[in-house]
Structures are given as structure tokens and as C-alpha cells.
């Protein structure tokens, strides 16, 4: 089974974010970056399916030059090779524009299964996988918690709301968006890290893949959310803050 | 030109976010000075369509087809694509449910449009629609504008609009029978199921202490367990903690876990991504302990301590014990 896993590099979770005053985005210069967490689960699922059924795992990543680090990490974990769509200005693409470029990069690959994380931690559209499926003409299922390969088909467990699930069957090739927690993430081994250095990374540009089209949406302004609720915040030494909080809980909120 | 709300129900039972979306559509319609319609999809939707006929709407589109009995992305996108092509609305609104996340991006793509997903607010500026979304798990907001031609697709976040603002009225029901062939539907949906009876009913707890990523390691869970014990509270968690197996899934609060509204909810080391907030923001008193003063959890908290939970929580346990005598 040839499996393509789409991954994205995003600012590290603990990042203190600052708004960029020169463009509607955040200041990126001092941030460290990492793999989008749901994509890490998609990669792990791809690797486990390959271990069970054989085949190949190809990582597809659209992002600036710095994303090469995240791609290497995916290769170190066990992906066989990678395609890096190099683009310094991802902000020039809307989700459909980017999915078209990704679909063009997959033209030559003809994968049996395409996996993505269910959403990105930065933009959080939760759409790239579904749009990519439509552009590629593939059936899809979202928020997947289990994948079983059968003969020419797959059976997946789709997460619904409020603790419900549903099994869905579909033919291959197909696209799945993977929910965090579907599996246990592996660490790269020393051997894996060594091997990753020799694995193929094909570099493509968005221009070669059809380029950007006129985006259908644009960011007008990026800003910190206004505080709408008046919270009472206590800081200072932990013991003092704790004492103040307990006093409030006892005499104001009356919950103790 | 009009505003079209595409609402979600299953077997005649409404998804609660449908009413929030309808309220959003009515507000938008008033501001854009455009008529508002609603659509409901299924095999037999006479009952839910009848209910919508009692709301202030121009029309209710009852989309019915035998192949729409069970939800599939292929079936829904096909049926709604045909409706939208005929009705030509300016704005199409959805509730941002798991089901909408499954089919709405496909529908928009098929019509060469881009869905603006998970919208928390809107405004109209000189007749133009501006939508507010959250970035970086709620840490940053963005105003989004549409650049191309309508229809403009958007989905609305849980709790962003108030269901009780839906205005009553009367509307005409129009049946719409899409043309769908069985071959269009490539996926085969099976029965819904739940994993097991929940042994822990968090909804019954008066006080909940909930733990998030800030706890760092499974070995640190007893630190918050002590706080729960001191308060006589149930212990709960945000999704990543359950994903890692540090606490069982049945203790998860949020959109994929339980929805709770206890007298007091203490969030420890939880940043407050929307998926968590929707499960607990109805709590009477919310306390947050987090090292990041900008964490979105402080948006919903009544009381908060900004600091290192590994120092704050033990101090809090001591103070609670003192206060309780």
C-alpha cells in the first residue's frame, strides 16, 4: 500500500505569540517550530499501516525552507521519502489554492491512501484533508480513530460528538483525516535519524505546480482577543495567591 | 440574494447548534437586509421542516431523498450543491459540527469556493461581511473577508450565537428532491455506537478538578488528585491527557467527551482550546491555574492564578484544608 501522509510545520505549542504590525499575521522570527500535532498521529498511523501491510510511506509537506527540519524528523521516524513543496509565503494561498498545489504534487504518486491530521494548530480550518480529497476525486472520512484494511477497501472508525462513534467502509484509494490519540507516537531512533539523512526529499515549487490563484478569502486584521469576561486574577507568591483564591471561593463564590 | 442556513438533525432530533446557526442567519439577514431561508436534509424531514416553518424565515427547503436517509459526505454535498446552485444565496451558514466538518469543505470546493470555518462573530462593514475566527487554538483572532464572488460559505462555532435569540414567525415549506444516483455515494456508513457504559458520570459532580497538558507527565497526576480529594471533587481531563492514556477516556471533558456544568470547575494546566471550552463553559464558577497569562482559559475563568501549577496546586491544597478546618 502506498500511503501519503500530509504534514505541516507550525509554531511550537508553548510559543508566546505576538502580532506582526507590518502584515496580518504573527511575528515568526523568534519562534521555534514543530510538526502539527494531529499530523504526527497521521504519520504514526501511516507507519503502522505500512508495518502491517507493507508498502511505502511518503511524506508531503508544503512550507518554507525551515520545514525541512520537520520533514527530516518524519523520515527519521520511518517515512521512506518526502516531497517538500517549498513556499515562503503560504499566506498567499487559501485552503483550496494550497490543496490544488498539493494535489498536483501527488499526480505522479497515485497513492492508495492519503492521511492528514484533522486540523492544524495554527490556522485551525480543519479542511485541508477534505478539500484535497475533493480535488483528487477521492472518497474521504474525517476524525478517524481506527483504520482496518480489507481487500481493496478500508473500514474506519469515525469519531462523532458526545462519545459516539461510527464505522464507515469505503473503497481505496481514499483520504482520511486522523484524530489525535488514535495511536501512541513513536520516537525516532538513533538509527532512524542516521538513515533519514540519506532518504530522498524531492523539492518542488508552487510555481511548478500551477502556482497561486486569486485567494477567495483574505485576512484583514490579526489581533489579540479582547477580554470579554472580567476575571479576578491572583499572582505573586503561590501561597499568597492560593490564600486569596480560597478566601474568594469561600466568601464570594461560596463554593467551599 | 439571500442568507441560507443549512441545519443539522438526525431522525427528527435537532443538533443543538442548529438553533445557534439559525439565530446567526437571522441576525445576518437583518444586517445585510436580505431574506433568510433554512434547509434541512434527510429521507423524511416533514417534522423538522414543520418546526422551522414556525420561525421568521422566507422559506424552508425540505431536501428529501431515499439516499439521504443516512448521512454521507457524498450524498449531502451532491444534494446541497444542487440546492445552492438553484437558490443562489449570498451567504450559506452551517453549524460547525463534526458532520459539517466532514462535508461542507467538499461542498464549497465542488462549487469552487472556500468555506470560512469555525466563525465566532461577524460584522457588516459598508455592506461587506467580516467574519471573526480564532487562530492558534484561541490565542489570536483574525478578521476574514471574502475576496471572490458569492456564495460565501461559513460555519459557526458552538456557543458563538445564542439559540434563544431565534425569532418566531411563519415560513413556506418548499420540497426539494435532488437527483442522486447510488453510484455517487462511495462510502458505506454503519451503525452509531458507544464504546461502553460510562462508569464515571462527570455531569453529576458538584465540583470538578480538570487537568491538562501543563501537568507534563503521567507521574504528576497525583498532584491534582490531591486537589480533587481536598475539594471532594471528581477528577477530569482535557483531551491530550486521555489521548496519552494518563487518565481514562471517560474522564474527558470537551466536544468529544462529556459536557459538564458543575458548581465549580477548576482547570489546572489547561490552555482552553475551544474543543475543551465547549464542554465546561456552562460551569457556575470557573477557576483556572495556568502559567501563561494569555491562555484562552482565562477568558472564561471567574478566578485565576497565573503561576507554576507545581507550586500553586500544593499551596492551594493546604489553604483549602485550612479553610475547611
Image (cartoon, coloured by chain):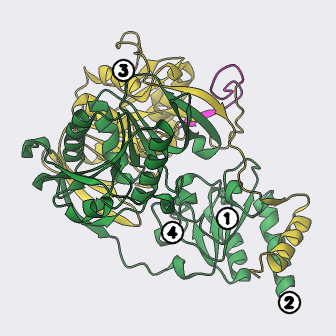
Chain colours: A yellow, B green
Residue B115: horizontal and vertical position, in percent?
40, 35
Splitting the image into 4 quarters, where does residue B126 fall? top right
Can residue A57 be seen here? The reply is: no
Q: Nearer the viewer, mark 2 or mark 4?
A: 4
Q: In the rendered structure, find residue B259 and report the number of the disc placed on it.
A: 4
Per the model, the C-alpha gap separating discs 1 and 4 is: 14 Å
Question: Disc 2 sits on a residue from what chain?
Answer: B
Left or right of A167? Residue A74 is: right
Task: Estimate how packed mark 4 is, as few (under 14), some (14 to 19) or many (20 or more) residues with alpha carbons within 10 Å.
Answer: many
Tag 1, which chain?
B
Q: Does A17 sit above or below residue A66?
A: below
Alpha carbons under labels 2 and 4: distance apart = 32 Å
Label 2: state its secondary structure. Answer: loop
Say which quadrant the C terminus of chain A sits in.
Answer: bottom right
- Same chain for mark 1 and mark 4? The answer is yes
In the displayed structure, B185 sits above or below B86; it is: below
Amino acid at each position: 500500500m502506498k500511503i501519503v501522509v500530509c504534514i505541516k510545520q507550525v509554531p511550537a505549542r508553548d510559543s508566546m505569540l505576538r502580532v506582526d504590525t507590518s502584515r496580518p499575521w504573527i511575528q515568526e522570527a523568534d519562534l521555534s517550530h514543530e510538526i502539527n500535532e494531529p499530523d504526527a498521529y497521521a504519520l504514526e498511523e501511516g507507519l503502522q499501516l505500512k508495518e502491517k501491510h507493507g508498502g511505502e510511506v511518503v511524506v508531503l509537506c508544503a512550507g518554507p525552507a525551515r520545514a525541512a527540519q520537520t520533514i527530516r524528523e518524519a523520515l527519521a521516524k520511518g517515512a521512506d521519502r518526502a516531497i517538500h513543496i517549498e513556499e515562503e509565503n503560504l499566506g498567499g494561498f487559501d485552503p483550496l489554492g494550497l490543496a490544488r498545489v498539493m494535489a498536483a504534487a501527488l499526480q505522479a504518486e497515485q497513492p492508495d491512501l492519503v492521511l492528514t491530521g484533522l486540523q492544524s494548530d495554527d490556522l485551525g480550518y480543519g479542511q485541508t484533508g477534505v478539500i484535497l480529497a475533493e480535488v483528487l476525486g477521492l472518497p474521504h472520512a474525517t476524525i478517524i480513530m481506527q483504520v482496518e484494511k480489507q481487500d481493496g477497501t478500508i473500514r474506519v472508525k469515525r469519531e462523532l460528538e458526545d462519545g459516539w462513534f461510527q464505522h464507515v467502509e469505503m473503497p481505496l484509494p481514499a483520504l482520511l483525516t486522523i484524530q489525535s490519540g488514535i495511536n501512541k507516537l513513536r520516537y525516532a531512533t538513533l538509527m532512524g535519524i542516521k538513515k533519514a539523512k540519506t532518504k530522498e526529499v524531492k523539492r518542488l515549487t508552487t510555481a511548478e505546480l500551477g502556482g497561486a490563484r486569486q485567494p477567495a478569502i483574505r485576512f484583514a486584521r490579526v489581533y489579540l482577543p479582547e477580554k470579554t469576561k472580567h476575571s479576578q486574577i491572583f499572582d505573586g507568591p503561590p501561597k499568597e495567591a492560593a490564600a486569596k483564591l480560597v478566601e474568594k471561593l469561600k466568601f464570594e463564590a461560596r463554593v467551599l | 440574494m439571500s442568507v441560507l442556513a443549512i441545519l443539522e438533525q438526525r431522525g427528527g432530533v435537532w443538533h443543538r447548534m442548529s438553533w445557534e446557526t439559525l439565530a446567526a442567519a437571522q441576525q445576518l439577514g437583518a444586517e445585510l437586509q436580505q431574506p433568510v431561508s433554512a434547509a434541512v436534509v434527510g429521507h423524511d424531514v416533514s417534522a423538522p421542516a414543520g418546526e422551522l416553518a414556525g420561525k421568521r424565515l422566507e422559506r424552508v427547503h425540505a431536501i428529501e431523498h431515499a439516499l439521504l436517509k443516512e448521512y454521507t459526505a457524498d450524498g449531502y454535498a451532491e444534494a446541497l450543491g444542487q440546492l445552492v446552485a438553484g437558490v443562489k444565496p449570498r451567504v450559506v451558514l452551517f453549524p460547525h459540527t463534526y458532520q459539517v466538518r466532514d462535508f461542507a469543505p467538499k461542498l464549497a470546493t465542488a462549487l469552487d469556493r472556500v468555506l470560512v470555518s469555525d466563525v465566532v462573530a461577524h460584522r457588516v462593514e459598508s455592506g461587506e461581511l467580516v467574519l471573526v475566527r480564532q487562530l492558534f487554538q484561541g490565542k489570536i483572532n483574525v478578521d476574514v473577508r471574502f475576496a471572490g464572488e458569492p456564495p460565501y460559505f461559513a460555519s459557526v462555532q458552538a456557543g458563538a450565537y445564542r439559540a434563544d435569540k431565534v425569532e418566531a414567525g411563519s415560513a413556506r415549506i418548499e420540497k426539494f428532491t435532488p437527483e442522486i444516483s447510488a453510484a455517487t455515494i462511495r462510502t458505506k456508513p454503519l451503525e452509531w455506537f458507544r464504546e461502553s457504559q460510562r462508569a464515571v458520570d462527570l455531569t453529576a459532580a458538584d465540583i470538578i478538578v480538570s487537568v491538562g497538558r501543563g501537568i507534563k507527565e503521567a507521574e504528576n497526576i497525583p498532584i491534582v488528585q490531591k486537589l480533587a480529594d481536598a475539594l471532594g471533587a471528581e477528577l477530569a481531563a482535557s483531551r491530550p491527557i486521555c489521548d496519552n492514556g494518563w487518565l481514562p477516556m471517560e474522564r474527558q471533558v470537551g466536544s468529544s467527551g462529556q459536557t459538564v456544568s458543575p458548581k465549580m470547575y477548576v482547570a489546572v494546566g489547561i490552555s482552553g482550546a475551544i474543543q475543551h471550552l465547549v464542554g465546561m463553559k456552562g460551569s457556575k464558577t470557573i477557576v483556572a491555574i495556568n502559567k501563561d497569562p494569555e491562555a484562552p482559559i482565562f477568558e472564561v475563568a471567574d478566578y485565576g492564578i497565573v503561576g507554576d501549577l507545581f507550586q500553586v496546586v500544593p499551596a492551594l491544597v493546604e489553604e483549602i484544608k485550612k479553610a475547611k478546618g
